Image (spheres, helix red, strand yellow):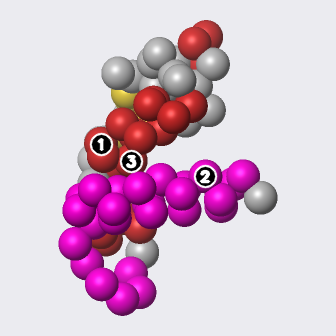
Amino acid sequence: GEGTGIPAAFGAILMNQGKIKQKGIFPPEGGVKPLDFIGQMQKFLKLRKVGDEKEGSPLIIESINAEGEVKRITF
C-alpha cells in the first residue's frame, strides 16, 4: 500500500541520484538523510509546507529534548 510503496519509491529515487551510498540491508535512518527524503516528499506530493497540518502535510516532525519538551518542526 501507499504506507510502504511511497517511501520505497522515494528511496529508489534517492538511490538513483546517488544520495544513498550504503549497500545491503539497513534501517532507513541508517542510510537516508532525512532532509533528502523530505525534499522528495515535497516535490512529488506537491506539499507547500512540511509539518503544518493546515497546509495538508501528512508528515509531522517533532524534536524532543532531554527534558521531554516537544517542539514541532515545520519548513
Q: How many angstroms separate mark 1 from mark 3 (CA)? A: 5 Å
Residue found at x 42% / y 75%: 27
Q: Nearer the viewer, residue 5 or 67?
A: 5
Residue 41 seen from this side: yes
Q: Amino acid at mark 1?
A: Leu
Q: Where residue 64 appears, x then y in whole percent?
A: 36, 42
Residue at label 2?
6
Q: Which mark is residue 5?
A: none
User: Does residue 29 appear to the left or right of 17 in the view shown?
Assistant: right
Q: How many angstroms separate mark 2 from mark 3 (CA)? A: 11 Å
Q: Quadrant of the C terminus?
A: top left
Residue at label 1?
35
Residue found at x 39% / y 22%: 74
Q: Residues within 10 Å of mark 3 (few under 14, many from 20)?
A: some
Residue found at x 22% / y 72%: 21
Q: Amino acid at mark 3?
A: Phe
Q: Quadrant of the N terminus?
A: bottom right
